[in-house]
Image (cartoon, helix red, strand yellow):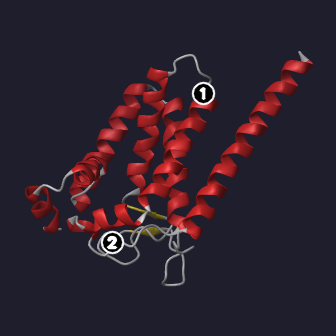
Amino acid sequence: MYFEQVLKNQFTKNIFIITFLMLAMQAILLIAMGQPLICACGYIKLWEGIVLSSGNSQHLTDWYTFSHIIHGFLFYFLFWLIFPKMPIPIRFLIALGVEVSWEIFENTPIIIEHYRQQALASGYIGDSVLNSLSDSISMMIGFLTAYLLPWWTVIIIGLGLEVWVAYEIHDNLTLNIINLIHVFPWIKAWQMAV
């Protein structure tokens, strides 16, 4: 019994260490890629609510934080389907690995330029390191929420967030994915009406 408890504690400690190392790697790579640590404005805001501002994707949270929470929901359910017998902490680390990889890829020049073709991201310069780390933490919160709450509650929350954010800013995770694949003129026109 004692040996099992020691192994369990070590496993939990290892999950925390790996999580920290993945986030540290994300920060180091973004800095090496030239992304600013914080907003060029020189201060940190908890919330940046203006999508068409130079502070968007630069502060701690913004309208796209909700998309990253939904990433966590989706990763939880996807990995539950693909790896049903895999321990939750391992699925969590895989989800974090995917999110960290996306955050790094999202801040490459080719993706930044692609985003600039969209109506709401014409002045986009990529994420600050702070915002990018916050996005990964938001995914972790979404993943853990999906683990703790009944599946139907998570679906209702996810759909509610998508509809609410679309109403507020004419963008959301679904539209972001569509625009990443192909920019449709009618979506662009609707988004420019913000």
Quick check: 123 above or below 155?
A: below
Quadrant for residue 17, please give it: top right
Task: Say which quadrant the C terminus sits in.
Answer: bottom left
Q: Residue at x 21, y 59 (%)?
A: 170
Q: Is residue 51 left or right of residue 40?
A: left
**How far apart, in angstroms, are the residues tagged by discs 2 and 1?**
36 Å
The residue labelled by disc 2 is 50
Residue 175: x and y in percent read 24, 51
Give the residue type at disc 2.
Ile
Quick check: 41 above or below 125?
A: below
Residue 130: x and y in percent read 55, 66
Q: Secondary structure at mark 1?
A: helix
Quick check: 12 above or below 70?
A: above
Furthest toward the bottom, the residue is 41
* Foreground pick, 29 / 146: 29
Residue 169: x and y in percent read 25, 62
Q: Nearer the viewer, mark 2 or mark 1?
A: 1
Give the residue type at disc 1.
Ile
Q: Is residue 4 left or right of residue 166?
A: right
Q: Residue at x 39, y 73 (%)?
A: 125
Residue 121: x and y in percent read 28, 68
| Mark 2 crowd level (few <14, some 14–19, many ≥20, 10 Å Cα) | few
Q: Residue at x 46, y 71 (%)?
A: 58
The residue labelled by disc 1 is 88
Quadrant for residue 51, please give it: bottom left
